Amino acid sequence: MALTKADIADRLFEEIGLIKREAKELVELFYNQIRAALENAQQVKLSGFGNFELHDKNERPGRNPKTGEEIPVSARRVVTFHSGQKLRARVEAYAEKQGKDSHGSGTSESEGQ
């Protein structure tokens, strides 16, 4: 299940008590600020979450996978996201917990023999 802008607006409505229209406007404003910063070649740093960065990629040779024909991949600017330490630690802790929960606490067949 994906988290959507509507989900975030609903949480603002429920948790903070904003009017739904205001919550939606706040979420849109937040995304517009990030978008505008990236359009102006600015790095976006969200403390405790991560960083959005722009990278310019040079033109490079590519290949059509169906025909094998060589074609140039044009130069372009891409956005990358690098998670912050706090986010990474929480995701890893959640993954470890899920791994332990899925293995169960029963004994294996070899232990019972």
Image: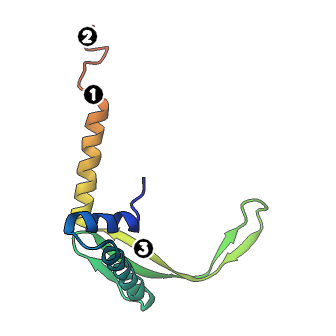
Q: In the image, which is nearer the foreground, mark 3 or mark 1?
A: 1
- What residue sits 35% from the left and 76% below the top? 21
Residue 38: image quadrant is bottom left
Q: CA distance from mark 2 to mark 1?
A: 15 Å
Q: State the image quarter where residue 47 is shown.
A: bottom left
Q: Earlier in the sequence, mark 3 or mark 1?
A: 3
Pointers 3 and 1 in contact (CB under 8 A)? no
Q: Amino acid at mark 3?
A: Thr
> Mark 1 Cα within 10 Å, few/some/many (few <14, many 20+)?
few
Residue found at the far top of this picture: 113
Q: Which mark is residue 104?
A: 1
Residue 96 image offset from top left, x and y in percent: 26, 44
Tell me, what colour scheme is on the image? rainbow
Checking the image for residue 112, the label placed there is 2
Crowding near pointer 3: few (<14 within 10 Å), some, many (20+)?
Answer: few
Is 56 left or right of 61, judged from the image as shown?
A: left
Query: Within 10 angstroms of label 2, few (less than 14), some, or many (20 or more) residues?
Result: few
Query: Foreground residue, 59 or 10?
Result: 10
Nearer to me, 62 or 107 = 107
Kind of residue sitting beneath label 1: Gly
Q: Position of residue 58 (x, y in %)?
A: 56, 82
Give the CA distance from mark 3 to mark 2: 50 Å
| x then y, percent, for residue 87 | 25, 62
Q: Is residue 32 left or right of residue 93?
A: right
Note whether 93 is above or below 85 in the view shown. Answer: above
The amino acid marked with disc number 2 is Gly
Earlier residue among tags 2 and 1: 1
Tag on residue 34?
A: none
> Considering the numbered disc 2 on the image, is that residue within a helix, a strand or a loop?
loop
Residue, disc 3: 80
